[in-house]
Amino acid sequence: RKTKKGSGTRYQSFIISKPVALFLKNIGVPVGNKTNTPFQVPEWVVKGSSETKSAYLRGLYDNEGTIYSNMEKTHKRWRIDFKMAKNEKLLSYGISYFEQIRTILLEFGINTSPVNYCKLNVRKDGSTSVLMRIAIEKSSFRNFLKYVGFDHPEKQEKLLFALRVGG
């Protein structure tokens, strides 16, 4: 399902096949609302080959990542962000998950910022959401391109552009 929210288009997918849904659950895909669900990087990814880790990261960044320049006119200060909201009560799980992602990225020589987080909003149920974020600076873009990259054509195009321009 395609929805328009904020500054961009977002997509949601729903699985109607019980066997497919059970398979995804069994391999470690979070079920339901990720904000209210504790989860970690699946063990088969953590212990997997470089190709497995790379594919996992590419899937994350294709779907949840953003590449942008915060100085659009001069194309300076490029970043690749990975963001996720988490229920404040589950913040420690979210931080742990982000640290796992940072560790895997570091295996490919991709440096990130520390995990940053800030309060996001109060939800209908009265709980508070926290927005978590890690950023990859341009100095690690070549390794990101070499070992992870994007399958998303617009994001890959931005990555290649960022590597061609200064800043």
Image: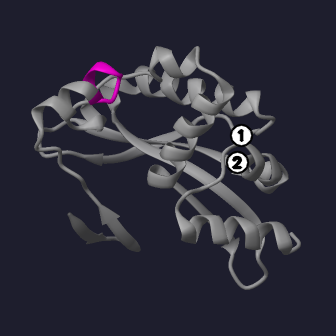
Q: Residue furthest right?
A: 166
Q: Residue at x 25, y 26 (%)?
A: 23
Q: Residue furthest front?
A: 19
Spatial separation of the CA atoms under disc 1 and disc 2: 5 Å
Q: Nearer the viewer, residue 81 or 148?
A: 148
* Quadrant of the snapshot with the N terminus: bottom left
Q: Nearer the viewer, residue 134 or 149?
A: 149
Q: Residue at x 49, y 45 (%)?
A: 59
Q: Is residue 25 magenta?
A: yes
Give percent across and percent down for residue 41.
Answer: 47, 23
Give percent across and percent down for residue 129.
Answer: 32, 40
Q: Nearer the viewer, residue 135 or 62?
A: 62
* Quadrant of the snapshot with the C terminus: bottom right
Q: Which mark is residue 128?
A: none
Per the image, the residue denoted by label 1 is 112
3 up-or-down from 125: above or below: below
Secondary structure at badge 1 equals loop
